[in-house]
Amino acid sequence: MDPEAGTTEPLLAQQPAVGTSTGPNPVVVVSEAPPQEPSWLRLLRKAHSQISNVGTSMLLGLGTAFALKTIGQSVAIALVLLFIGLQVLAYYGFVNFNWRSVGGAVVRQLDLNADGRVDIHDCSIVCKRVVTWSLAWGIPAVLGFMLGFWLGWRFL
């Protein structure tokens, strides 16, 4: 083929496919199917993915507990000082809090069944939402995080 002849065919189209020959009796190479892996190996692979998921979640729980314990104390002290400062400002008349309005807003946020009060039924709704959320994320991941958080909070 002359490169200066100006053909528009790609060079790869002119070569025979891999595993075939161009003679009068073409040879096609057939690969064998991979051997079936044993069931114990499949089970081990599945267990490994779940164990690594639990381990990762546990490490995240440990880190969260450590961060919350170290930073949480400082944040708690800052919030208490802020509350005391706001109460001092209210005592001297610089600010005025409408506590009925604040209480109504809190009740509206916590009253999940819209019956006008926060009671055990609202707690039941929260529990159902937590269970649904944890099932959506996967029980091993949630349990691993909770175990890691508890261990971190307790022993770090």
Image (cartoon, helix red, strand yellow):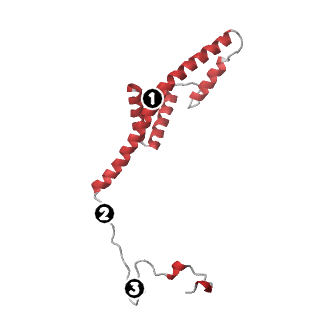
* Residue in the picture at 54% in, 18% down: 77
Q: What type is the residue that disc 1 sits on?
A: Phe
Q: Nearer the viewer, mark 2 or mark 3?
A: 3
- Could you tell me residue 152's position as x and y percent? 40, 29
Is residue 118 in view? Answer: yes
Classify residue 20 by image quadrant. Answer: bottom left
Name the residue that disc number 3 marks: 26
The quarter of the image holding the N terminus is: bottom right
Classify residue 40 by image quadrant. Answer: bottom left
- Could you tell me residue 149's position as x and y percent? 42, 31
Name the residue that disc number 2 marks: 36
Instruction: Please say if 35 is above or below 139.
Output: below
Q: What type is the residue that disc 3 sits on?
A: Pro
The quarter of the image holding the C terminus is: top left
- Could you tell me residue 105's position as x and y percent? 63, 25
Q: Quick check: marks 3 and 1 in contact, CB under 8 Å?
A: no
Q: In the displayed structure, does residue 23 sit left or right of residue 13?
A: left
Residue sticking out furthest to the right: 94
Q: CA distance from mark 2 to mark 3?
A: 31 Å
Name the residue that disc number 1 marks: 66
Q: Quick check: marks 2 and 3 in contact, CB under 8 Å?
A: no
- Could you tell me residue 80's position as x and y percent? 57, 17
